Amino acid sequence: MLAKVCSAAVNGIEAYPVEVEVNAGYGDTIIVIVGLPDAAVKESRDRVITAMVNSGFGFTFGRTTVNLAPADVKKEGPSFDLPIAVALVAASEQMESTLLDKYIMVGELALDGGVRAVKGVLPVALRAREQSKIGVLVPPENAPEAAVVAGLQVIPVRNLREAVGFLEGEIQIAPTHVDIARMFEVSPDEEMDFAEVKGQESVKRAMEIAASGGHNLILIGPPGTGKSMLAKRLATILPPLTLEEALETTKIHSIVGLLAPGQALVTRRPFRAPHHTASDAGLLGGNINPTPGEISLAHHGVLFLDELPEFKRSVLETMRQPLEDGRVTISRAAGTMTFPSQFMLVAAMNPTPDGKMPGESRSSPREIQSYLGRISGPLLDRIDLHVEVPAVKFQDITSGRDGEASAPIRERVITARRRQHERFRDKPKITCNARMSSREIKQYCVLDEATLELLKFAMSDLNLSARAYDRVLKVARTIADLAGTEKILSDHISEAIQFRSLDRQLWT
């Protein structure tokens, strides 16, 4: 008998439908799985047979063919265990159901018939809705993740016997529901706060500007000045994720397997801080079958690179295209994948090889220049704000006063972002000032004659590149948004120019 069951697989960060066809015939006892299965899918044959027997189902002894269509796309992972088992039960005439083509099902089977969690359930649920399916059958641990997709029945099945009973109508299983609004409620007690940072008001101002416009930022200062402490608190002043952004971020974390058991949605902006020994594949993504790297895991969040010059130059150079385009394309023999990577780059570095300021360093000017030269000019051009982090003053350390808390700073950031959303309401791909193209810069960064003359002088005096010129205008646009003015004034341009320290070569 022939049976067909609906499933899905993930390619990149999107899911595509897979039809599991099983034909139980006569002949020698053998199960053949076709349709470009990988090793994990081929091994499902033994898991499925054992799970069926231990669940009380018989097995038809004869030639059984399992086809995973479309046959020209490679199938990976153990998520096909459950649909293959259900199809085998149906093909051996041990169940009757009219719902096999109404639900998409995924799940790994244990030898006792239990259903274990798998990766990439959110993209699968989104695909099920696009195909107008009634719902999905998923492991209980993955049910909250799938339940964030509205208009879809999410049926948690604990074992194979329960899945078959539900499809036959013998068992009623309540669909899983989640309260999305409640997920976005963040308790301040669980967060770090800018109030804990002593002094460094100018650096906080730069970080507020960066958060308001989504700008890339580099912190330059000797050890112990609080660069890492400040960077880790940047996430506390970023605007909240929208539902659309949360779904995009969750899809990436889901296919990598970073969601905690029972976690439905990534509701906080990611903060990723890879070690400086990270490889190209670790940062951008890759391996034999392309998977997202750190820059994609930081999508809609922050990528923090501490000790920036210690990263391999080849690794840093590979980030230039994703920083500009907001996505990374990885080409391998197995195929080409494109992953989103709209993140804020926050980097930290010492001013000299020994960590001291140039006037105090024992390093020669050539050694300092060589140290700074590990970061290429084109990469620095893509960093909007170059911020000096001075040593903390003694009176600031001993002062009992706290700095400004994250909450009021965040409110100002959210207000500035609202102005940008209103400005770019007809341009959905532009989410903040940092994402403006040359066309938008020309339209929204108009300068009067005096302000234009100031910028012209800075371009000549600092020898800024055309890309740096655009960055100055974008930062000035954000400063004007924080000030609540539509017009960019000379004060805004002057402050933006102050954040080009490395262009001015102050360290050499």
Image (cartoon, grey):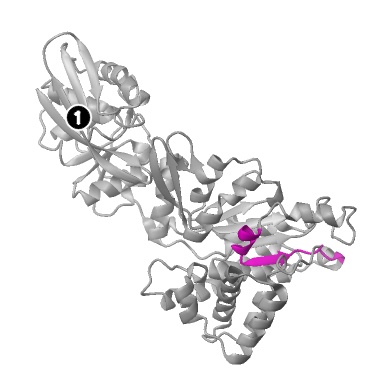
Q: Is residue 183 placed above or below 490 in the rendered structure?
A: above
Report if residue 379 lies within the magenta region.
yes
Q: Is residue 203 left or right of 137 when viewed as pictured?
A: right
Mark 1 crowdedness (10 Å alpha carbons): few <14, some 14-19, many ≥20: many
Element type at marker 1? helix
Please indicate whether residue 97 sits to the left or right of residue 255 in the image: left
Q: Of 408 and 88, which appears nearest the observer?
A: 88
Residue 397 in which image quadrant: bottom right
Tell which residue pokes out farthest to the top in this image. Answer: 28
| Residue 335 position in % (x across, y down) | 38, 39
Q: Identify the residue at horizontal 23%, vertical 18% (top origin).
A: 32
- Is residue 28 placed above or below 73 in the rendered structure? above
Question: Quick one: quadrant of the C terminus?
Answer: bottom right
Residue appearing at x 43%, y 73% in the figure: 421
Q: Nearer the viewer, residue 131 or 262?
A: 131
Q: Position of residue 324 (x, y in %)?
A: 51, 60
Q: Which residue lies furthest to the bottom in this view?
A: 449
434 within the magenta span: no
Q: Tell me the residue at 66%/77% (across/down).
A: 459
Q: Residue at x 18, y 18 (%)?
A: 64
Counting labels gives 1
Q: Nearer the viewer, residue 503 or 85?
A: 503
Residue position for label 1 = 164
Under mark 1, the amino acid is: Val
Which stretch did the figure color magenta? 377-394
Visible in this render: residue 275?
yes
Estimate the x, y position of residue 305 in percent, counting from the top left: 64, 51
Is residue 193 something one can see in this rendering?
A: no
In the image, residue 169 sits, relative to residue 194, either above or below, namely above
Q: Quadrant of the N terminus?
A: top left
**Residue 219 or residue 324, whichever sits in front:** 324
